[in-house]
Image (spheres, rainbow, N blue to C red):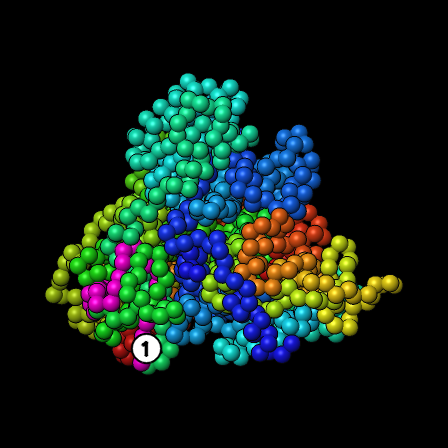
Amino acid sequence: MQKSRHLKDLEAESIHILREVAGQFERPVLMYSIGKDSSVLLHLALKAFYPAKPPYPLLHVDTTWKFREMIAFRDEVAARHGLDLIVHINQEGVDEGIGPFTHGSAAHTDIMKTQALRQALEKHKFDAAIGGARRDEEKSRAKERIFSHRTADHRWDPKKQRPELWQTYNGRLSPGESMRVFPMSNWTELDVWEYIYVEDIPIVPLYLSAERPVITRDGMLIMADDDRVPFEPGETPQMKRVRFRTLGCYPLTGAIESPAHSVAEIVDEIKAARTSERQGRMIDKDQTGSMEKKKEEGYF
Amino acid sequence: MNEAAARAKASPKAAGREIQNAPGGDEMPILRFLTCGSVDDGKSTLIGRLLYDCQLIHEDTLESLSNESRHFGTTGGDLDLALLVDGLQAEREQGITIDVAYRYFSTPRRKFIVADTPGHEQYTRNMATGASRCDLAIILVDARKGVVTQTRRHSCIAHLLGIEHVVVAINKMDLIGFDAGSFVEIEKDYREFAAELGIPNVTAIPLSALTGDNVSTRSENTPWYEGPTLLEKLEAVDVSGATATSPLRMPVQWVCRPDLDFRGYAGTLASGTVSPGDHIVALPSARTSTVTRIVTSDGDLELASAGDAVMLTLADEIDISRGDIICLKNDRAEVADQFAADIVWMSERPLLKGRPYILRCGQQSTICQISDIRHKINVENLDHIASRQLELNDIGLCNLSVSKPIVFDQYQDNRATGGFILIDRLTNETVGAGMIRYSLRRAHNVHWQAVDIHKQARSTQKHQRACCIWFTGLSGSGKSTIANVLEKRLYAQGRHTYLLDGDNVRHGLNRDLGFTDADRVENIRRVTEVARLMVDAGLITLVSFISPFRAERRFARERFEGEEFLELYVDTPIEICESRDAKGLYAKARAGEIKNFTGISSPYEAPESAELIIKGGSKSPEELADSIVEFLVEQKIIDEI
């Protein structure tokens, strides 16, 4: 299958943005979260600078609750491309025993993800963090700029965003400030899957359907990926043919029952889908306007 | 699962089959369009309708939508499609969209990116932002109201930003019983206005976003209408325009040097095409070479065209860096340091003549000044209005000068190389956007009047190095007193000097200036330029000027060559300055009789990297002047005596 015209357009726009980051910032970093969007983002970065390697390291903020397959995949990808991979864990959070089962999704995400990210950015003095977020994921993202400014305390102010015209990006910063950059802003979930298909991009196998042990909680199918799951009385994992539409911390990521065991089948499934991608994300549902609030506080 | 198995399984093509219904290679490019209308024209409803009709609304979204419709909706509990597109919480509560948001949908024929921009009057900024990347604008008109001020305003902005295709969506036809006469009347009104503006392609469509008539399905209520539905129009419109056939422009973003054998220039083609063997020129340096390869990770290309992100290698090792633009040798972009441009002002603080801003045009960045605001543009009819400044959401035609020449095209020929943004140097915010009309003088035709006796000759004759010593500090800090003693010392040594005093200059050269922000900027500019002339004449030029703001002093510094400018900070505690109060100004300021008095009611921004700091009040003016003389010797401004 040929790469379609619109995927070529999207690819070129993303490469343009990735090169702008290299041209405008002193210490950029590519946020690598191991998911499908990160896989595409990394693929685009490899293309943008070919035959050189991307002029920035990868950063993974590890909450210590990721699926084991994700971690294995991450290390394998970094080794294969010979890339500099920085893994950051919020050690204070680990010491306090923070986890989604004991502290709830909101506290866990805040401490192990949002705060951990801040720590990593500050520790390495990164001035630009490139992420794979897309505007079609969630309503508040629809208004976010491609070069999205963060104050010195990492806050996003949706009312004070810089106007962004043409493909001219203003990456100027005052001391302590930083930029989040989203080269895939204009991609949709379907674009991502079609691109993975035509470009033959490796992805974590969890996206593909297989028999996996899951329990049902609050209407979500949660995979018991290790022995930290506190089962409630009578709760035993059932083997089900499931896959994941998004990947995050395993206790917070719901699986869907699906027979799609190839990328081509996923593309078909999404074309026919009637539920949106973030449906499996517990953290979006905490409260109305939930993502907007998290972002103002510095969530990616 | 072991790693090899994981890889095999995760490889997309390892399992499964070809996707059958994927689009082929002859499909339409992405259409980026914007929607504009007044607050109640039903713009959000129209976008919601397009998304809904194209089945882009998922079940869980629909569920939360019906929750929200009960909370915030304006349709009495019915599904309020507008809520689909009004994103941020605050906006939902206010019932208006306040920023640019982007939406995505596609049909089997085309992918669409919608820039949803607000209709409220004060948001010209957002509309210009949205329009900058769009090829088509949908302008909503309420069928009951016809063409109104807002309609004209939106059309003018769309036109200024270079949009050539306008769809006039005459909405709420259901509320006037799908009356053909009204539609024809409104269409006629609009076409007359569009012709005056010079919008080349106009299509008017009678529709109802609420009921869906003529949005994606042909309405049975308008048998008299023979044109396309809105969606048919969007799917079919050809916006390829001239970028593919225009001359080659490739702004260089990044230079790739993985090893000594490879040097590639990465960039996106703004227009035109390029092939190996093409004779190119890099501007502004005007160095020429030949393209050898078009490198991509998918293999070398024989041809790249507008929109492609590529990497070029050249036959010669010429010096090209980020910001340069690669053109064909025989079809070059312009290079100039003065030009006229339409500017959309986007900041709460007005644009001031003479104040320096950072101008970013593609990958080029330079300091610029507005040398003249020729007129403001009335965006309801494009009439000219005289003005001395541009306020938030004003659009004006201005003359600009930049500190180094930039490479550009006229905006109407090339949006990518003719559009620029203006950035505030203190806040780093994007404060304006500009569209270049024409150069005021071509840098390659205009030379400085060549003179045989130049600055260095004049300095050498006087046995000194010409410089500008810029005294800054609070009122009463002793600047003028010390400068005066210093000049006497230098004069006694036979040096050639001149002292420019801020107060004295206001009696003559700057007597027409007051103390508004605009006038202060102009005041500094004139003093700086006079000091430059003095330095050019070979003089040691002393400037005594409170100049409380770093931006002002930086502006002055940038007008001089490398080591000519010496910032001298007279650092005297405000208590001492106030106790001196030679002119009684502090007393008046404390009494509130003088507004914006530096140190009392207006800040003084101390220099961060002054060449010399003098502790005022610590020693006598004579002793301080002596220490400055020593400093000048160190700096090789003057020889030792």
Q: Is residue B267 magenta?
A: yes
Describe residue A275's horizontal placement relative to residue A145 as left or right: right
Question: Where does residue B363 sit, x and y in percent of width and height?
Answer: 36, 60
Q: Residue at x 68, y 58 (%)?
A: A257
Question: Where does residue B161 sit, x and y in percent of width and height?
Answer: 36, 43
Q: Residue at x 48, y 45 (%)?
A: B107
Q: Residue at x 50, y 46 (%)?
A: B105
Give the letter of the chain under mark 1: B
Q: How many marks?
A: 1
Report helix, strand or loop for mark 1: loop
| Residue A224, placed above or below residue B22 | below
Q: Is residue A275 magenta?
A: no
Question: Where does residue B169 sit, x and y in percent of width and height?
Answer: 44, 31
- Toward the viewer: B442 or B276? B276
Residue lying at the far right of the rendered structure? A233
Q: Is residue B188 visible?
A: yes
The part of the chain drawn in magenta is: B261-289
- Residue of label 1: B262
Q: Residue at x 53, y 49 (%)?
A: A143
Q: Is residue B607 visible?
A: no
